[in-house]
Amino acid sequence: MYTIKSMTPEERAYGLLTYIYGYKNININKNEISIKYNNSNRIKYIYYRGKAIFAFRNTDGYLLPLAEATQFLRFPYVVVDDETAAFVAQGRSVPAKFVKAYSGDVRPYSEVLVIDESGKPVAVGRLLYSIRELTLGRGYAVKPRAVVQR
Protein backbone atom coordinates (compact mmCIF):
# COMPACT_ATOMS: atom_id res chain seq x y z
CA MET A 1 0.00 0.00 0.00
CA TYR A 2 1.27 3.43 -0.92
CA THR A 3 1.03 6.50 1.22
CA ILE A 4 0.83 9.93 -0.31
CA LYS A 5 2.86 12.61 1.40
CA SER A 6 1.11 15.95 1.38
CA MET A 7 3.11 18.92 0.19
CA THR A 8 3.85 21.94 2.32
CA PRO A 9 2.63 25.32 1.02
CA GLU A 10 6.24 26.25 0.24
CA GLU A 11 6.67 23.12 -1.90
CA ARG A 12 3.43 23.91 -3.71
CA ALA A 13 4.60 27.47 -4.37
CA TYR A 14 7.91 26.17 -5.76
CA GLY A 15 6.00 23.72 -7.96
CA LEU A 16 3.81 26.52 -9.26
CA LEU A 17 6.89 28.63 -10.02
CA THR A 18 8.54 25.82 -11.96
CA TYR A 19 5.30 25.17 -13.84
CA ILE A 20 4.84 28.81 -14.88
CA TYR A 21 8.44 29.83 -15.57
CA GLY A 22 10.13 26.50 -16.30
CA TYR A 23 12.42 24.36 -14.20
CA LYS A 24 15.62 25.54 -15.90
CA ASN A 25 14.74 29.23 -15.60
CA ILE A 26 14.50 29.33 -11.80
CA ASN A 27 17.55 29.48 -9.58
CA ILE A 28 16.13 29.28 -6.05
CA ASN A 29 16.24 26.77 -3.21
CA LYS A 30 12.75 25.59 -2.32
CA ASN A 31 13.73 25.26 1.35
CA GLU A 32 14.29 29.02 1.64
CA ILE A 33 10.84 30.03 0.37
CA SER A 34 8.30 31.58 2.73
CA ILE A 35 4.74 32.66 2.01
CA LYS A 36 2.64 35.60 3.21
CA TYR A 37 -1.12 35.10 3.18
CA ASN A 38 -3.91 37.69 2.98
CA ASN A 39 -6.90 37.88 5.34
CA SER A 40 -8.83 35.19 3.45
CA ASN A 41 -5.87 32.77 3.76
CA ARG A 42 -4.79 32.96 0.12
CA ILE A 43 -1.22 33.44 -1.05
CA LYS A 44 -0.36 37.13 -1.34
CA TYR A 45 3.45 37.16 -1.68
CA ILE A 46 6.22 34.62 -2.02
CA TYR A 47 9.41 35.53 -0.21
CA TYR A 48 12.89 34.19 -0.84
CA ARG A 49 15.58 34.87 1.74
CA GLY A 50 13.36 37.51 3.33
CA LYS A 51 12.63 39.49 0.16
CA ALA A 52 9.34 39.51 -1.73
CA ILE A 53 9.99 38.09 -5.20
CA PHE A 54 6.50 37.21 -6.48
CA ALA A 55 3.00 38.56 -5.99
CA PHE A 56 0.00 36.28 -6.48
CA ARG A 57 -2.74 37.46 -8.85
CA ASN A 58 -6.01 36.01 -7.54
CA THR A 59 -7.94 36.33 -10.79
CA ASP A 60 -5.99 33.61 -12.58
CA GLY A 61 -3.46 32.22 -10.09
CA TYR A 62 -0.46 33.68 -11.91
CA LEU A 63 2.66 34.59 -9.95
CA LEU A 64 3.82 38.04 -10.99
CA PRO A 65 7.56 38.70 -10.65
CA LEU A 66 8.66 41.66 -8.57
CA ALA A 67 11.93 43.58 -8.85
CA GLU A 68 13.86 41.21 -6.56
CA ALA A 69 13.00 38.23 -8.81
CA THR A 70 15.39 39.47 -11.50
CA GLN A 71 18.38 37.87 -9.77
CA PHE A 72 16.76 34.44 -9.40
CA LEU A 73 14.78 34.03 -12.63
CA ARG A 74 15.67 34.03 -16.32
CA PHE A 75 13.16 36.21 -18.13
CA PRO A 76 12.39 37.03 -21.71
CA TYR A 77 13.87 40.51 -22.11
CA VAL A 78 13.65 43.78 -23.99
CA VAL A 79 16.72 46.00 -24.47
CA VAL A 80 16.44 49.80 -24.38
CA ASP A 81 19.08 52.51 -24.72
CA ASP A 82 20.55 54.21 -21.65
CA GLU A 83 18.49 57.38 -21.97
CA THR A 84 15.22 55.43 -22.11
CA ALA A 85 16.41 53.26 -19.22
CA ALA A 86 16.66 56.39 -17.04
CA PHE A 87 12.99 57.16 -17.71
CA VAL A 88 11.91 53.54 -17.18
CA ALA A 89 13.77 53.56 -13.84
CA GLN A 90 11.31 56.27 -12.77
CA GLY A 91 8.39 53.94 -13.52
CA ARG A 92 7.47 55.21 -16.97
CA SER A 93 6.37 52.96 -19.83
CA VAL A 94 8.71 51.90 -22.64
CA PRO A 95 7.86 53.35 -26.06
CA ALA A 96 8.11 50.79 -28.85
CA LYS A 97 10.38 52.96 -30.97
CA PHE A 98 13.07 52.88 -28.26
CA VAL A 99 13.25 49.08 -28.07
CA LYS A 100 16.66 48.18 -29.50
CA ALA A 101 16.48 44.36 -29.24
CA TYR A 102 14.46 41.58 -27.63
CA SER A 103 14.78 37.90 -26.91
CA GLY A 104 13.13 35.43 -29.22
CA ASP A 105 10.79 34.05 -26.57
CA VAL A 106 8.78 37.23 -25.89
CA ARG A 107 5.00 36.92 -26.17
CA PRO A 108 2.32 39.59 -25.93
CA TYR A 109 0.98 40.16 -22.40
CA SER A 110 3.82 38.17 -20.85
CA GLU A 111 6.17 39.37 -18.14
CA VAL A 112 9.49 40.68 -19.48
CA LEU A 113 12.66 42.15 -18.07
CA VAL A 114 13.67 45.58 -19.34
CA ILE A 115 17.46 45.85 -19.53
CA ASP A 116 19.77 48.66 -20.64
CA GLU A 117 22.46 48.34 -23.30
CA SER A 118 25.06 47.21 -20.77
CA GLY A 119 22.85 44.30 -19.67
CA LYS A 120 21.76 45.65 -16.26
CA PRO A 121 18.10 45.11 -15.29
CA VAL A 122 16.00 48.25 -15.13
CA ALA A 123 12.43 47.04 -14.56
CA VAL A 124 10.02 44.13 -14.74
CA GLY A 125 6.81 44.65 -16.64
CA ARG A 126 4.18 43.42 -19.03
CA LEU A 127 4.90 43.38 -22.75
CA LEU A 128 1.87 44.81 -24.52
CA TYR A 129 2.90 44.08 -28.11
CA SER A 130 3.81 41.11 -30.25
CA ILE A 131 7.17 40.97 -32.02
CA ARG A 132 5.57 42.21 -35.22
CA GLU A 133 4.00 45.19 -33.45
CA LEU A 134 7.34 46.04 -31.82
CA THR A 135 8.88 46.56 -35.26
CA LEU A 136 6.23 49.16 -36.13
CA GLY A 137 7.64 51.52 -33.48
CA ARG A 138 4.36 53.03 -32.33
CA GLY A 139 2.78 53.23 -28.91
CA TYR A 140 4.01 51.83 -25.60
CA ALA A 141 5.54 48.38 -25.68
CA VAL A 142 6.14 47.60 -21.98
CA LYS A 143 4.24 48.73 -18.92
CA PRO A 144 6.58 48.36 -15.91
CA ARG A 145 5.29 46.62 -12.81
CA ALA A 146 8.34 47.03 -10.58
CA VAL A 147 11.54 49.04 -10.95
CA VAL A 148 14.87 47.47 -10.03
CA GLN A 149 16.82 49.62 -7.57
CA ARG A 150 20.28 50.44 -8.88
Image: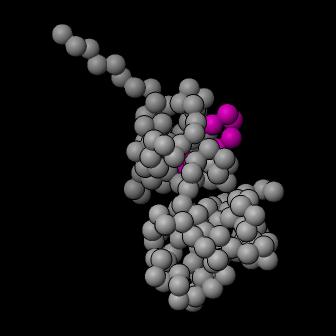
- Vertical order, 94 against 75 (above or below): below
Residue at (53, 30) in percent of width and height:
30
Whether residue 107 appears in this view of the structure is yes
Residue at (68, 41) in percent of width and height:
51
- Vertical order, 65 against 103 (above or below): above
- Which quadrant would residue 47 be assigned to in this image? top right
* Coordinates of residue 35 in the picture (x, y in percent): 56, 36
* Coordinates of residue 109 in the picture (x, y in percent): 47, 69
- Vertical order, 41 against 95 (above or below): above
Front residue of 80 and 17: 80
Whether residue 40 appears in this view of the structure is no
Residue span colored magenta: 48-55
* Coordinates of residue 12 in the picture (x, y in percent): 43, 34
Q: Is residue 14 left or right of residue 100?
A: left
Q: Coloured how?
A: one colour
Badge count: 0
Which residue of the protein is positioned furthest toward the left in this rendering?
A: 1
Front residue of 38 and 25: 25
* Coordinates of residue 141 in the picture (x, y in percent): 57, 78
- Which quadrant would residue 34 be assigned to in this image? top right
User: Quadrant of the image for the N terminus?
Assistant: top left
Residue at (41, 57) in percent of width and height:
59
Front residue of 143 and 44: 143
Is residue 49 located in the magenta-colored stretch of the structure?
A: yes
Residue at (57, 31) in percent of width and height:
29
Is residue 114 located in the magenta-colored stretch of the structure?
A: no
- Which secondary structure is most common in the magenta stretch? strand
